[in-house]
Amino acid sequence: MERKVHRNATVSYGRNPYPVDPKYIGEKVELRVLDNTVRIFHGAAKLGTFDSRIDWRERLLRRIHQRQVKRDGTIRFQGRRFRVGTRLAGRRMELLRHGNEVRVYLSSNEAKTFKVGRGTPRRR
């Protein structure tokens, strides 16, 4: 079945949202459901596999944060600085931490993704 990726980089199935890479915002993806597994594809590329028994809505809602962009165009989040651009200085942005990624939603259809691994040193 096809679904359109929402502006918050999720697709819905069975009243449950599933996260997708923000570069697919506004595009159609295919969901393949087998037993308790939801697989998301864009063309031949597999975007993710999820267990449908997990309440992803609750997990996603708990992880949305808001931060104000500093004059130098950065946002501080969890001890790290993320550069989003000086054109956004002074504005409040929504952030979502998902696994080893931090997604910053810049507008209704634009987001930046930053990789943060366990081995990544924190800047102070």
Image (cartoon, grey):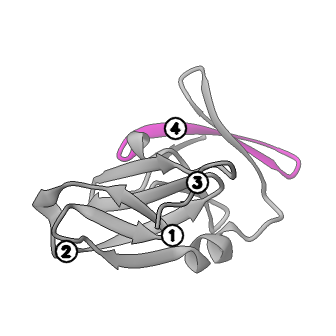
Magenta residues span: 25-39
Which quadrant of the figure has residue 33?
top right
Please report whichever mark, 2 or 1, sits nearer to the chain's N-terminal start: 1
- Front position among marks 4 and 2: 2
Q: How much space separates mark 3 and mark 4, taking CA atoms?
A: 35 Å
Please report whichever mark, 2 or 3, sits nearer to the chain's N-terminal start: 2
Please report whichever mark, 3 or 1, sits nearer to the chain's N-terminal start: 1
The one nearer the camera, 105 or 44, is 105
Who's the residue at 28% across and 62% down the image? 74
Q: How much space separates mark 2 and mark 1, taking CA atoms?
A: 20 Å
Residue at the far front: name it.
124
Kind of residue sitting beneath label 3? Pro
Q: How much space separates mark 4 and mark 1, taking CA atoms?
A: 34 Å
- Front position among marks 4 and 1: 1
Q: Kindly state the secondary structure of the residue where label 4 is placed.
A: strand
The one nearer the camera, 8 or 66, is 66
Kind of residue sitting beneath label 2? Arg
Q: Kindly state the secondary structure of the residue where label 2 is placed.
A: loop
Q: Residue 50 placed where, x, y %?
A: 75, 50
Please report whichever mark, 4 or 1, sits nearer to the chain's N-terminal start: 4
Task: Let me know if residue 28 is in the magenta part.
Answer: yes
- Front position among marks 2 and 1: 1
Q: Which mark, residue 91? A: 2
Q: Kindly state the secondary structure of the residue where label 3 is placed.
A: loop
Q: Which mark, residue 79? A: 1
Q: Which residue is mark 4?
A: 29
Who's the residue at 39% across and 78% down the image? 66
